[in-house]
Image (spheres, helix red, strand yellow):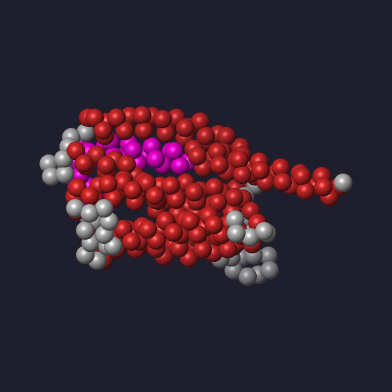
Amino acid sequence: MRRDGALAGPAYLAAPMFHAFANPARFNRLARAVYPWSLAATLLCLGVGIPWALFFAPADYQQGESVRIMYVHVPSAWMALFVYLVVAALSASSLIWRHTLADIVAQAASPIGACFTALALATGSLWGKPMWGTWWVWDARLTSVLVLFFFYLGHIALARAFDDPQRGARAAALLAVVGVVNLPIVKFSVDWWSTLHQPSSILKLSGPTIHSSMLWPLLLTIAGFMAYFVTVLILRSRAALLAQRRRVLEFRKLAAG
């Protein structure tokens, strides 16, 4: 219960946690601590996973050598969804608690997610040509991923579309939260509609349907992509915080002058 006698809801109870991480100094300390580990994990997982996938994992009995595109396509597609979920969660916390740091990190993450999505679309087309006989089909999975890419671009554009950074951040945050409705469509489109895209082979209640000789290098590349995202996000967020601090100092200098 709050001091005014009202019952504490979930947002009120979660607020202290978000307030704790909304401090730029605390965020920088955490980022400095995490960065060496995320960088090491990136180098280790991708340094082992990519050569394993390209040279040592077996070819598929139906798809042949073209199956090796999977080791880039699947991690990039997973990260496209995950990064957007991160952007949406940060945007929601910004709209609820007015944390500027949440906007900064969300705007730092959005271009990374857009790159993952573009990579998923490109590798999907490369994989689709020998399998389906065409570079592109307007089925539910491909179309919903393309829509996800447009949501990323919209978020990036809106954040920079206003002279007032706060108005741009708020408009971008609203778009990011609205775009969450597309995530389950991307994920479950192959189950809800008849599509050319194959169903999930890893996240299944009955267990993965992919052989362990292919599963392990795939999991390593997924972990490497995840660690890469954390590493680049830390670099971009810290650079954005430094740029914001410089702008504030320049504004104070002009005001004082």
Residue lying farthest left? Answer: 61
Kindly identify the residue that appears in the image at 71 percent across and 42 percent down.
246
**Screen quadrant of the N terminus:** bottom right
Identify the residue at horizontal 25%, vertical 47% (top origin). Answer: 127
Is 238 part of what is drawn in magenta? Answer: no
Q: Main secondary structure of the magenta part?
A: helix
Look at the picture and state if 12 lies above or below 119.
below
Q: How many marks?
A: 0
2 or 184: nearer the eye? 184
Task: Provide residue 76's location: percent of width, then percent of height.
Answer: 36, 46
Which span of residues is magenta-colored? 202-230
- Give the farthest residue toward the right: 257
Res. 12 image quadrant: bottom right
One can see residue 152 in this view:
yes
Residue positioned 50% across, 39% down in the render: 232
Q: Position of residue 27 (x, y in %)?
A: 60, 42
| 55 is higher (above) or lower (below) than 152 | above
Horizontally, residue 118 falls left or right of residue 130, namely right
Q: Is residue 212 magenta?
A: yes
Q: How far from the left and from the top, in percent, is residue 96?
A: 59, 62
